[in-house]
Image: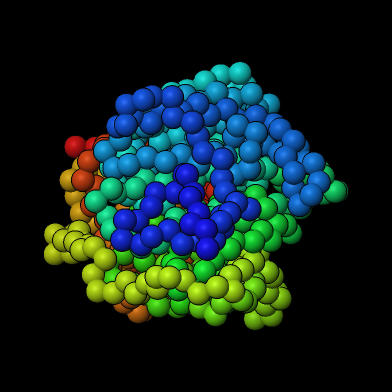
Amino acid sequence: MALSVVMCTPRPLELPLEQPPGWDEAVRLTEAADADPDPAVVDVRLEAKIATVMLDGRPTQMWTYDGVVPGPLIRARVGDTVIVRFTSSLPEPTTVHWHGVEVPAEMDGSEATQAAVPPGGSFEYRFTATKAGTFWYHPHVRSSAQVGFGLYGAIIVEDPAERAYGDDLVLVLSDVSTADAGVLAPGDQHGWFGDYFGREGGLLLVNGKRLPTVKARAGVPQRWKLVNASRARYWSLEVPNAEVLRIGGDVGLIETPQPGNGVVLTPGERAELWVKPLTPGRRSSVTAVDADRFHIGYPQPPEAVLELEVLDEPARHGAEAPSGTLREIVPPDAAAAKPRTFELMDLVDGGAGQLGINGKTYRPDEHIPVRLGDTERWEVHNSTAYDHSFHLHGYAFVPTNLAGRSWPVREWKDSINVPAKQRLELLVRFDDRPGMWMLHCHILDHVELGMMTMLQVRP
Ligand code: C2O
Ligand code: CU
């Protein structure tokens, strides 16, 4: 049996690499080229441009970063300086938002913190990668259309001190609407209804591919780092023929592994799964099942999105499931926390239905003052009849309760589902980085209808 060598995957010392040759070839992401030889500096170029990509076997014009969908994978390690020299040749203004990364406010890429980059323009993003985790980047101007056209990519921050849990596989989940073969649907398809219900593309993609195959060996774990980069689709994945533990969330490892046979990810959300394939010689499909975010009770049929091919050869080394404490999470101090509530709601605004927060649709000239250094306890009520994906810029939070139940594990999050008519409780500390920070529903079409507001964090 040949030992395979996979160049770009960091290799755990205690687990000799035993993934089959070419195991991740079908889903391997283009990696951004680091132009700086200094190991503590990641210096990359990124260009937003329209390009022809192969979409389910058809050449299709999409909006891309560097001509690929998803955009290039950016890898950094904790403590690294990250410089992204961004240029745009898109036909309209854009920005790059570093979803989940704790950047200074002026690097956040929202329309509150920088002027949008015009066609032909450029911007230099520069920040320090402070926390390990699975993050992503996308535009924050007309984001529902721009993300829907293909503008999204992953940024992975690794902690060299963390033990290895399996071979890394970054999987970006997205969906695309095509009007005709090879032509994307317009960003505002179906008008107000499209906004209100959230546009889900009919083509489900894993790393830009329809139903690619990942190879594996029974007993040899893989660490799947999943990003939901869809504009509106909730991804509820079931992974067959494998032992599955959720070991990470939005911002790195969770406190203890959580068993399950899959995971649900709302738009913007991430998870890390430890996946140990079981029966050798079997090919099975990872399926996306309907997450029923409208609570209408007749689910869409499940759809195969990724094939898992488990080789018909035994592994030489099996692996024990991770157990116990993966890392200690100390939540912000609840005793010192000031309460604040948000209501995600339907609004009627002169006839046309709008969405809003605390009675208002988004207005760029309004913001909520927050004191730097404060710890807050938030209650987020969803008074609508549908689920919403709550996302906070700049600060990770610890969820404590959802829909009347304690959150099952301590973890840091920035994106989370708030089910219809339910309430989320969380703790957040505004420890640093004053400035303007948005919070909004990450069903990006809902941003267009106003379900967004802004915090101003200041001393
Ligand atoms: Cu990923 Cu304000 O967004
Ligand atoms: Cu929403």
Which colour assignment does the render follow? rainbow
- Vertical placement of 247 versus 225: above or below? below
- As rendered, which of 111 and 275 lies closer to the eye? 275
The percent position of residue 245, horizontal first and vertical second, equals: 41, 73
Rendering coords of residue 241 (x, y %): 55, 78
* Nearer to me, 405 or 25: 25
Q: Residue at x 30, y 35 (%)?
A: 80
**x and y, in percent, of residue 263 in the image:** 49, 70
Q: Residue furthest top?
A: 120
The residue lying at 36 percent from left, 79 percent from top is 404
Residue depicted at 49% across the width and 49% down the height = 6
Q: Quadrant of the C terminus?
A: top left
The outermost residue toward the right is: 180
| 88 with respect to 15 (left or right) | right
Q: Is residue 434 above or below residue 378?
A: above
Q: Position of residue 133 (x, y in %)?
A: 36, 51
Q: Residue furthest front?
A: 1
Tell me the quarter of the picture where residue 422 sits: bottom left
The residue under the point 59% across, 74% down is: 312
Which quarter of the figure has residue 341?
bottom left
Q: Is residue 70 left or right of residue 204?
A: left
